[in-house]
């Protein structure tokens, strides 16, 4: 270490003024770069604490951070706050415990403090304000919505109110984080507000964005548009479910990444009610049975008469006037039976809700099977295709049919519902793709690490370059005035010049005259001695 210090000191003495200034400037630059690197590396890694804040919430959060002495950064006009990464979650919990942020406007926290002596009008107004604030905060949490404000108009509920046909209405103003918002989100906002207000229907909710566009007009013009979106989403879910079933059946057979399945489902979107009534004459049963019996007796007799033939002949011309008719007796017995039958009747009410599957079709692509390479194959040899037999193709089609649960209808073939083809896929395998992704990820991590330590490396490189330049730098030659021809007084302190050579006495004299030339004089004197 001592020798190294002496070498540096000797090198410093050999340098000229310009070289010394350059060395000092380079050293200061290296030291400054290293200091800046250390300061930069010790700075905390800032992450997002809250974004899309209102002015009130941003001011409250910054005030809390300043009170706790937490370093922070503010961007996007004060709406975004960043804090050190190791304090993000702790600060969020601390701020949530203090009710920050609470969103724009007031919510139901307005009723946390007891307020006595307020009129019904003030209480009702506060309730509407709280409801508007809570709805605005909720809508602001949706994707694509930066902020929201809700205005509710609710008629007074008075007993003697003449106009009872006034219905509540609402307006929603949203600031979008993007240029557009889908119709499903607009329909969700309308239903959210309508279900939060008593008596409010979705058609009475207007949604307006920050560009002045009335987003709810399309839904008002076509009320089925919102339900159509839900139906399309349900159809997509059904098709994905069926395709997944088929893929799980085929993957063990053909291998991973060797099959592509797409399923098309026909969904019944209509709600129907079917009433069916059937009569069965053969299945009649006795409903009522009535039995009635009628019995009658009648008897006739004479008052008197003469015995004989004439007396027994009725309406005889010889019968004396006033003579009575003989007696007659009549008996009758009548029996009636009435039976009522009830015909067997079946009444069936069937209600079909939307969502039932009417029909399913599938298209399946299977990769060509490759023949295994022989043991003595070249390293760059590629496998050759080995087509499947028709029996194997039919077996795979049958697997798809069974997985989907298809049943042929009258005059329909299942081959028309399931299309299965064997085609060549791209040569890039899944393993190669995964390896490529891993390589890209690894390179990206290296670049991130390199960017972090780039400044250190640059400073070291600069230092080494200057050090190498200084080590190769030769001292500037300084002319030394030597007495080569003029006679010298031998009595003057013994100075003499023999054949142009430099004596010690002359060297001392030169050093006294020009102290700057000490190193050059010594070198010259050494060279003279050697010669």
Image (cartoon, rainbow, N blue to C red):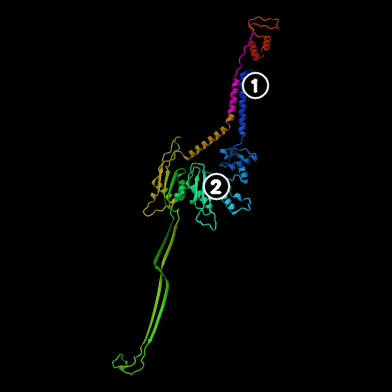
Query: Where residue 198 sits in the image (x, y, percent)?
Result: 53, 54
Residue 378 location in percent, x, y? 44, 35
Q: CA distance from mark 2 to mark 1?
A: 73 Å
**What residue is shown at x 58% (from left), y 25% (from top)?**
462
Q: Quadrant of the C terminus?
A: top right
Asked whether 189 or 20 is in front, the reply is 189
The residue labelled by disc 2 is 136
Start-end of magenta stretch: 458-482
Is 36 on the left-hand or right-hand side of 277?
A: right
Q: Which residue is mark 1?
A: 8
Which element is circle 1 on?
A: helix
Q: Residue furthest bottom?
A: 306
Q: Residues within 10 Å of mark 2 (few under 14, many from 20)?
A: many
Q: Is residue 235 visible?
A: no
Image depth: mark 2 or mark 1 in front: 2
User: Dot 2 lies on which element?
Assistant: helix
Residue 170 image label: none
Q: Is residue 409 visible?
A: yes
Q: Quadrant of residue 84?
A: top right
Q: Is residue 465 magenta?
A: yes
Q: Is residue 269 above or below residue 320?
A: above
Residue 39, x across and y down, in percent:
62, 32
Q: Position of residue 325 (x, y in %)?
A: 34, 91
Residue 79 or residue 444, whichever sits in front: 79
Which residue appears at 61% of the width and 19% of the height?
Answer: 18
Of residue 296 and residue 81, the one placed in the foreground of this image is 81
């Amino acid at each position: 270490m001592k020798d190294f210090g002496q070498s540096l000191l000797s090198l410093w003495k050999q340098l000229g003024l310009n070289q010394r200034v350059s060395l000092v400037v380079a050293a200061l630059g290296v030291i400054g770069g290293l200091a800046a690197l250390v300061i930069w590396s010790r700075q905390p890694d800032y992450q997002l604490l809250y974004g899309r804040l209102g002015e009130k919430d941003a001011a409250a959060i910054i005030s809390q951070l300043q009170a706790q002495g937490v370093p922070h950064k503010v961007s996007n006009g004060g709406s975004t706050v960043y804090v050190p990464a190791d304090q993000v979650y702790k600060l969020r919990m601390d701020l949530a415990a203090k009710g920050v942020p609470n969103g724009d406007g007031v919510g139901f926290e307005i009723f946390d403090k007891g307020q006595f002596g307020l009129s019904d009008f003030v209480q009702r107004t506060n309730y509407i304000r709280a409801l508007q604030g809570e709805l605005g905060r909720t809508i602001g949490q949706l994707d694509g919505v930066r902020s929201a404000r809700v205005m509710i108009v609710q008629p007074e509920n008075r007993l003697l109110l003449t106009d009872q046909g006034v219905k509540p209405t609402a307006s929603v103003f949203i600031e979008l984080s993007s240029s557009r918002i889908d119709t499903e989100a607009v329909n969700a906002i309308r239903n959210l507000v309508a279900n939060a207000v008593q008596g409010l229907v979705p058609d009475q909710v207007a949604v307006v964005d920050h560009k002045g566009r009335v987003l709810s007009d399309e839904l008002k013009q076509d009320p089925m548009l919102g339900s159509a979106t839900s139906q399309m989403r349900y159809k997509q879910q059904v098709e994905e479910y069926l395709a997944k079933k088929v893929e799980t059946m085929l993957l063990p057979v053909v291998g991973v990444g060797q099959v592509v399945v797409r399923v098309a489902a026909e969904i019944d979107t209509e709600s129907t009610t079917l009433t069916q009534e059937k009569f069965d004459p053969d299945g009649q049963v006795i409903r009522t049975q009535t039995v009635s019996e009628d019995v009658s007796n009648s008897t006739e007799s004479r008052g008197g008469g003469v015995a004989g033939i004439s007396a027994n002949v009725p309406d005889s011309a010889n019968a004396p006037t006033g003579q009575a008719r003989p007696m007659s007796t009549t008996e009758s017995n009548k029996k009636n039976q009435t039976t009522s039958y009830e015909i067997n009747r079946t009444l069936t009410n069937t209600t079909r809700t939307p969502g039932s599957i009417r029909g399913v079709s599938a298209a399946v692509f299977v990769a060509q099977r490759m023949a295994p390479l022989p043991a003595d194959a070249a390293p760059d040899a590629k496998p050759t295709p080995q087509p499947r037999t028709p029996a194997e193709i039919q077996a795979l089609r049958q697997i798809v049919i069974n997985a989907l649960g298809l049943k042929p209808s009258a005059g329909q073939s299942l081959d028309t519902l399931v299309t299965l083809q064997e085609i060549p896929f791209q040569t890039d395998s899944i393993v190669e793709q995964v390896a490529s992704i891993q390589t890209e990820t690894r390179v990206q991590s290296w670049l991130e690490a390199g960017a972090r330590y780039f400044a250190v490396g640059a400073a070291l490189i600069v230092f080494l370059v200057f050090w190498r330049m200084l080590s190769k730098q030769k001292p500037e030659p300084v002319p030394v005035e030597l007495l080569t021809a003029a006679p010298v007084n031998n009595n003057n302190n013994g100075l003499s010049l023999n054949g142009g050579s430099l004596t010690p006495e002359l060297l001392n004299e030169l050093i006294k005259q020009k102290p700057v030339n000490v190193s050059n004089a010594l070198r010259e004197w050494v060279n003279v001695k050697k010669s």
